[in-house]
Amino acid sequence: MIKGPVMNRRQFLTSSSALALSIGASGGFSQQSYGGPYLIRVHAGGGWDLSLYCDPKVNQVGVAPITNWSNEADIEFAGGVHLAPIANNIDTFERLGPRTLVINGVDTQTNAHQTGERHTWTGSASEGRPGITALFAAAQAPEQPLSYLSFGGFSATANLIRPVIAQWDALYWLTQPRPSIEHELLERFRSRGLDIVSDREINAPWLARRIFDYGRGHTSKEALSSLHQILPRESEAPEAVYRGESRLKAEVQTSLLAFKAGISASADVGAGGNWDTHATGEFAQVDYIRALNNGLTYLWDLAESLEIADQLIVIVSSDFGRTPYYNSYGGKDHWPINSYLIMANNPIWGGRVVGHTDEAQNASKISPSSLKVSSTGSIIYPKHVHHALHHYLGIDDFARSVGYDFKNTELYDFFNPALSTAGPLPNPLGSNLY
Amino acid sequence: MASGGGGSMLLRAQAALLAGIASLSVGISPNAFAYSGLTGKVSSLLCQTRIAAAGSQEDYARNLYAAADPVVQQRCIGCHIENGIAPNAGAKLALRRQTAANHAAFNHNAFQSLAALRSPQHILSKAQGASHGGGAVLGAFDDDYQALRDYVNALDAGFACNAADGLKGQASFEETVWKGVARLSPAETYRRAAIVVGRTVPSKDELEAVESGQTSLDEALDELMSGPGFHDFLITGANDQLLTDAFMNGLFPVSLHSSHFPLVGAIDHELFKNVGEEAFRDNGNWELWIAQNYGHARAPTELIAHIVENDLPYNEILTADFTMVTPLTGDLFNSDAEWEEEVVYDGTFSDFHMEFKPGVNRGQLLSPRPRADKKGEECIPVPHGECYMESFTGRRKAHAGVLSTVAFLQRYPTTETNRNRARARWAYKFFLGVDIEASAARTTDPVALADTNNPTMYNPACTVCHEAMDPVAGAFQNYDELGNYRADFEDSLPWIYKTEEGSPYKEGDTWFRGMRSPGFKGVVAPDNETSLVWLGKQMANDPRFAIGTVEFWWPAVMGSAVLSAPEDPSLPGYSDQLMAFNMQRHEMGRLALEFSQSGYQLKSLLQSMVLSHWFSASAVTEDHPYKGLLLAAGLSVNRLLTPEELEAKTRSLLGITVGYGVSDWILPWQYSYLSDYRVALGGIDSYQVKNRARGMTSVAAVVTGDHAFKAAETIAETDREIQDGARTVLNGVDFTEAPVDSPSLRNVMVEVYLKLHAKSYEPDHEAIDVLVDLLIEAYELPEYDSWRYIGHQTGQEAERLLREASERGELKEDDRYRSPEEYQNTKAWRLVLDYMLSHFDYVHD
């Protein structure tokens, strides 16, 4: 090893460093459980067709059809949300609408899946930023053993926190309690051993994170048993969807139970199915939407029964949207305009739709202060949604401290219950419901 | 629970972490890197000579622009043309096509203005994707990038050649960075390489031979690259990229149907004849299908392994005119592979059915056959719906290495609208290191996406990707979504395309009209029938194949993903990340060059990677100026081992596999504790979880802890029964006496560290204190802690160790009296081993 002047490691404990915050004030494992708030991200992987969901569109005279359903029906309104009257949309949002803020007309500026996913969930099309759930977990409960739970999808962390990949069939066994005097003895000696490693590797700065993760992994693992006590041996059964299955309910179940156990702050779950429906027509999207709605209903039912609903925020979105016309195979290709559903337990800002797209699903400029369509406003980009979310979730200070805030970005007043954007235009082919 | 000691431990780790973080803030400016870094050698004496010859700095730059102009025209002009997408979106760079008058002067002035306004590095960063609406359009090691870099660096007098550049012996930036970095010794490098590449831990003698120079490091590394451990490394590393093991982990198994592979039906019929209707109904043909699936799923990775292990040029993975078959898939393919046993279809399967050999595919019908439901004709029904032909002579179909394997084609299937583009995208990514989706210009204008006038052909926002992608997609023209060659016997075009009203399809077409012709890099494939074979040869001989191969194998060797170019200069650590990225690209370029010079010998490349600083850098000087860069680089030494590596390490050091068993579920699958819980320890299932997680988490700590506990239990209990000197680890231990701190005990601990952690400590080192204290304290604990006896048992492995020791005559007498002290010592040593096997230094390497 190269000899150099011995570094006084402890002086760094009192220094201010952005990433120091990311590893938590305690630096290690907190014996206190985490009581919320909690954040769940639901991703519809592949690009969802919003004209079938929360940004419903009807066919226009002289223009290629945008939706098949609008040949026979008109847009409906449930729980404060305009909806396509397909799948189980109406029943779902009659109940969940008051919990939901819909942000339509968000321009992801891409038709590439990876970029779209990154832009939607980090607020930037560029590499480098953490996803909203990673940032949230790092801000709220970095010391918890399952602080940021993932089920295998996109999880950018900017090295703020390690995601725990929830192995589908193993978590029950791995969280089994081990209240052993042997374990206590081993952990005590392990800490001595790790001190020696830390001293030895002081000149290998790339090992600092690995040593830290190792220490935190071991000191926090005991708390996993609190999840085991409430985790059933059999998870919720998958729901069959077109050419696959949705595990959304099971992933939600594990996530909410981890929240309830006080060992987790955020989770990324997947709306089942391959939403990239270039050639599979509308029926595949309808099938996926049905399963997504079922999963969201299950999520709120379970959150209520676990008595954590008041602490829960849910964000639902996708890579981007799909074209405002069908291709020759009855499917739709990529379209950069996206939407977000933001949900909480009967918030004052629920039952509203903000943002807007025209009849051809082009995003409209929106005033940040009035949320009305305005030629002097801006197109809403994912950064605007994330900027507002940082503010709403109370992690803006943390985001700033670690360098992942959104500087020079307009703050849209999305969560102001008094503001909303105009609804969709009436169906020129059918009755006018509005 | 966390104790005071735990807090101290974390405090130290946190302090070390913060020490690293602090260095981020004392990094250097990107501009400093831009000049003294990769450009240091480029703009040297030659550069000065050129300036002098040109007459002035500006003339020199204009001359240099001429070399960069093709790059600008091909890579930038699509969006940055005057009044184009980029200038209209606010970009400051507006350019002219070469057909415009004075375009060179105009474009040169545009670049010069932007360089003056921002910096040359700003332009280069944009090209690499930083805050660039068009994303990354040039890779740092592309020839195109170098041409652009030479040009823009010459724009700034401060950046162009100064006197120092021409000094003989001037160190490159890379040399400057590595100068302050210590590396593992040859023996330490050999040991790491053995675990990673050879899936073994060298013996003490082997390590000493390397350390003393008796065996050269090159020779030792060469020795590692054979045998089952190396084979496992190749299969695992290749699958980490190709993800074809997904077929065995939840993805619908590889499917061939008798409509195209008549031997599917014939073999099912054979099974039916042998096992009878009852057994057949009892999932007999389903089990056969699953057993066949193994052969299909592993064929691409086994093909790669075969080429490497037989020292064939690695680019044959795209040109090999054969595939790999098991006895079962060999029969399906009517292959020419010969087996030592006769393949019998009686519903039972053994290791024999998991063997692989090279073989060809001549099992597909290449012309229509009689309908199965017509009585008296050749296709005879099999009970579950397939049918078989009494007489079938398959025609041999040329292979294109991995590209034509059924598993590759079904893992990356085509659809009616995708039209083989997924196959093209992944072929580019896996074999040329080109990520089309990530590097393509992003569409910033929704109008471009609304363009319905064949935008992939004509809209610049789309052609930027599709120009490269679509011809390659076309080269896969003969394969349908299941990988059937010419599914309609004339072509594999979608039925709807051929029949829809207004379709441009014409009789004899094999590819879509309105799409680019099958080809590669502007050359049209000469023959529709064998376009994939032709593509394989083109890719195999493409200059990017070498760098693509380095990228392919980098994660398997280094244990970390290939770095991405940072894109947002406003984010923390940007300059360090960009420097690290460029350093890595530079290293990859060097490795690629050596690899191509070796005649594409992958073993040679693996050896070069192991000898790289990136594999063996172990420490830096305290005042190293580029500590932040090294932190961002994520160097390899002491990384968390993958489940496969950890299991191999334990097997090699202790002779056991925790939780080992062989399932009789269809094929004799080997399983273990770590294979069952691999995802929790950062592994992949290739289906739901496709990327390895490289950091320790709470759940991973449980997995490594349980693994250590079971291994420790096995070794402590068996070593107690084995004569001193012949034990796996605990030689010198007296199980009959209560432990006391003594020189002999400390010497035992020194040996334990040496064997399990490869660390050499003096007997009075604090690490030895830890073990001695632990042993003495553990001895006083109650004998048995039932809570810890969970999950997998290692009884079989313990029995095997004892049986083998008995066969060697090394067991103590079995009927001897075992005192309470023996059991207390067994427990105490089990805890010492548990500590050692779950220690940072064991699970990292």
Image (cartoon, coloured by chain):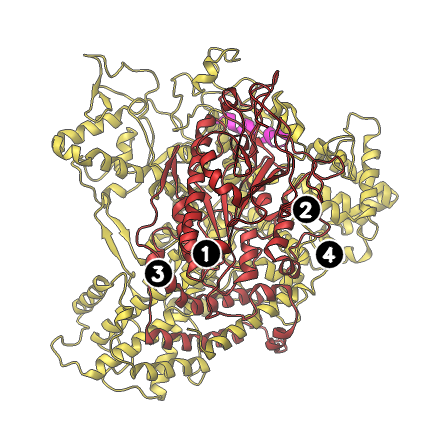
Chain colours: A red, B yellow
Q: Amino acid at mark 3?
A: His
Q: Earlier in the sequence, mark 2 or mark 3?
A: 3
Q: Amino acid at mark 2?
A: Tyr
Residue A299: image location, x then y, percent: 43, 47
Q: Gap in Å between the C-alphas at discs 3 and 1?
A: 18 Å
| Residue A49 in sight in this render | yes
Question: Magenta span covers which residues?
Answer: B462-476
Pointer 2 residue: A412
Q: Are marks 3 and 1 on the same chain?
A: yes
Pointer 3 residue: A228
Using the image, name the chain to which the residue with label 4 belongs.
B
Residue B291's quadrant in the figure?
Answer: top left
Q: Amino acid at mark 4?
A: Ser
In depth, the one of A22 and B468 nearer the eye is A22
Q: Are marks 4 and 2 on the same chain?
A: no
In depth, the one of A181 and A372 nearer the eye is A372
Q: Nearer the viewer, mark 4 or mark 1?
A: 1
Marks 4/2 in contact by CB < 8 Å: the verdict is no
In the rendered structure, find residue A414 and report the number of the disc placed on it.
none
Residue A98: image location, x then y, percent: 53, 43
